[in-house]
Image (cartoon, helix red, strand yellow):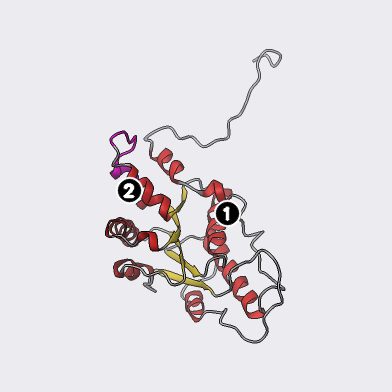
Amino acid sequence: MDPDLVQVYHITAPDYRGSGSELVGYELSSLDQHADQTFENFSLREGEVSRDEVASLEQALAFARNYAAHPEEWLVLTGGYGSGKTHLAAAIANARKAMGDHQVLFVVVPDLLDHLRATYAPDSQVSYDKRLDQVRTAPLLILDDLGTHSATPWAQEKLYQIFNYRYNAHLPTVITIADGVALDERLKSRLFDVRRCTNLRLMVPGYRGGQSSPRTGSSRAASTGFGRAQSSRRTR
């Protein structure tokens, strides 16, 4: 090949040819919107929250790092809005991607439900079964913002189909849930099964984008649920 006549360009984008299932997953993913959320820039909010709350964030960060290195079973992140749940979930996905794992699927639950509904349209390019199968069989699935939008019977049924399949197949799954969200009992039976799920609760106030005087004394930051979860999972 004559270098004076030919220029060679190397395309580094993932190959989405083949069965089409990889492309479906790519269309579903919201990870590009969270590409800047990593473990390295996760804020411990020192100087803003109490020492106990900083310690709880340190524990949550360490636990999420360990899960990213060895994803097993389910990890459920709960807390108030702005507590850092989504950041940690996205950081897990970004860490896996940096390790060469391009099969991790990060999707926001309301968007997932919209994608499933869209398959009913006559001009849909993807069948419902194919879309559902892509989600429930993903090697690592991260579902962000499970909440009130899933309160309809239809949404609950679709989510239960996904959860139940992954639960029985022992497929690694990360889910974020805001405090105070009422969940279907069938979903709760999967999400809070201590044999399969680790529950981390980030008991810190919502991030306000600035610093304020830290609270002193003891706080509720170190959740007892987190303590049980930490002991139920071996550290590697």
Q: Is residue 79 left or right of residue 41?
A: left
How many tags in the picture? 2
User: Residue 14: x, y in percent?
Assistant: 51, 37
User: Residue 231: x, y in percent?
Assistant: 49, 77
- Which quarter of the figure has residue 45? bottom right
In the structure shown, which secondary structural element does the residue marked by tag 1 occupy?
A: helix
User: Residue 221: x, y in percent?
Assistant: 57, 78
Q: Which mark is residue 132?
A: 2
Q: Is residue 1 above or below residue 159?
A: above
Residue under the image location 40 percent in, 33 percent down: 18
In the structure shown, which secondary structural element does the residue marked by tag 2 occupy?
A: helix
Q: Earlier in the sequence, mark 2 or mark 1?
A: 1
Residue under the image location 65 percent in, 16 percent down: 6
Give the extent of the magenta segment.
122-132
Three-letter amino acid code of the residue under disc 2? Leu
Three-letter amino acid code of the residue under disc 1? Ala
Q: Which mark is residue 83?
A: none
Which of discs 2 and 1 lies nearer the camera? The answer is 2
User: What is the quadrant of the C terminus in the image?
Assistant: bottom right
Q: CA distance from mark 2 to mark 1?
A: 25 Å
User: Residue 108: x, y in percent?
Assistant: 45, 54
User: What is the quadrant of the N terminus in the image?
Assistant: top right
Residue under the image location 28 percent in, 35 percent down: 122
Is residue 139 visible to the viewer in this orientation of the structure?
no
Tag 2 and tag 1, C-beta contact below 8 Å = no
Q: Is residue 151 above or below residue 137?
A: below
Residue at image mark 1: 95
Residue positioned most to the bottom: 217
Are there few (<14), some (14-19), or many (20+) residues within 10 Å of tag 1?
A: some
Q: Is residue 138 above or below residue 164?
A: above
Q: Magenta span has 66? A: no
